[in-house]
Image (spheres, grey):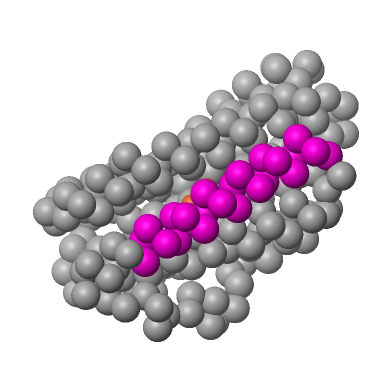
Amino acid sequence: MTAEEFVAALDADNQLRLRALEPDATLTPEIDGPLNVPNLLKVALKNEIEATEIAARWLVTTDDVQVKLALARQVGDEARHYRLIAERLGTLGIDAGGLDPLAGGFGPLFTYLDGLATTVERVAAGQFTREAIAVVKNRQFIAFCERVGDKDTAALYRDTIEPDERFHHELGRRLLLRLAVAPEAQAAATAAARRTLELADELQKKALATAGIHHAPGC
Ligand SMILES: [Fe+2]
Ligand SMILES: [Fe+2]
């Protein structure tokens, strides 16, 4: 398979599997109890700091200048998302300066990504797939914000955060076109993308079971 054919096939496979993350078929949106915008934004803070940190770790461990620059851009974007979300929480009456989203340690998806050794796996998992998941989750979160009447949070995600996450996904696509050429590289990229989707699915099921959360934004 050429790199173009491979990336198109991986994208199609990801999109198919991503439908499992879309809750509409099996889940009824639930807005009672602890499920509210501020609590979901706190989940988002953790996702954003983890996305910042993994991109930073990968930046310093690659020799590929194009990959370094893509990751540098992502580090800046994810850190900016963190700040924007913290500011939004402040407007909603919650002092995010007093929160430490990493107090409980890094999550399982971060730990998995941190263990990936090759650039092609990292790009397939961390940018091409994780950011495709973010696009789906953010779309769900925007719909949730609109349902509960929080237009400002919906606008923050629709106008600023979501376009960045889409861009990160496209960066992943561009890098994969260059890196996923050999059959071994393509096989490694596929396995990393699958595992990322499995972990996201497991995490979503766990969040749903423990906290009733199924609209948490991604990054
Ligand atoms: Fe982000
Ligand atoms: Fe992102």
How many labels were placed on the picture?
Answer: 0
Q: Where is residue 183 in the image (x, y as percent from the top left)?
A: 86, 28
Which residue occupies 29% across, 68% down? 89
Q: Which residue is outermost to the left?
A: 149
Quadrant of the image for the N terminus? top right
Q: Does the magenta stretch include residue 83?
A: yes
Q: Position of residue 209 (x, y in %)?
A: 38, 69
Q: Where is residue 91 in the image (x, y as percent from the top left)?
A: 22, 67
Q: Is residue 12 toward the left or the right of residue 136 in the image?
A: right
* As drawn, 68 above or below 47: above
State whether residue 212 appears in this view. no
Q: Is residue 148 toward the left or the right of residue 139 in the image?
A: left
* As drawn, 190 above or below 31: above
Which residue occupies 56% across, 36% down? 169
* As drawn, 85 above or below 101: above
Q: Where is residue 93 in the image (x, y as percent from the top left)?
A: 21, 75
Q: Quadrant of residue 102?
A: bottom right
State whether residue 158 appears in this view. yes
Pick the residue in front: 25 or 124: 124
The residue segment tinted magenta is 64-86
Q: Is residue 88 toward the left or the right of residue 130 in the image?
A: left
SS assignment for the magenta stretch, majority: helix
Q: Does the magenta stretch include residue 154?
A: no
Q: Is residue 40 toward the left or the right of residue 218 in the image?
A: left
Which residue occupies 80% across, 30% down? 179
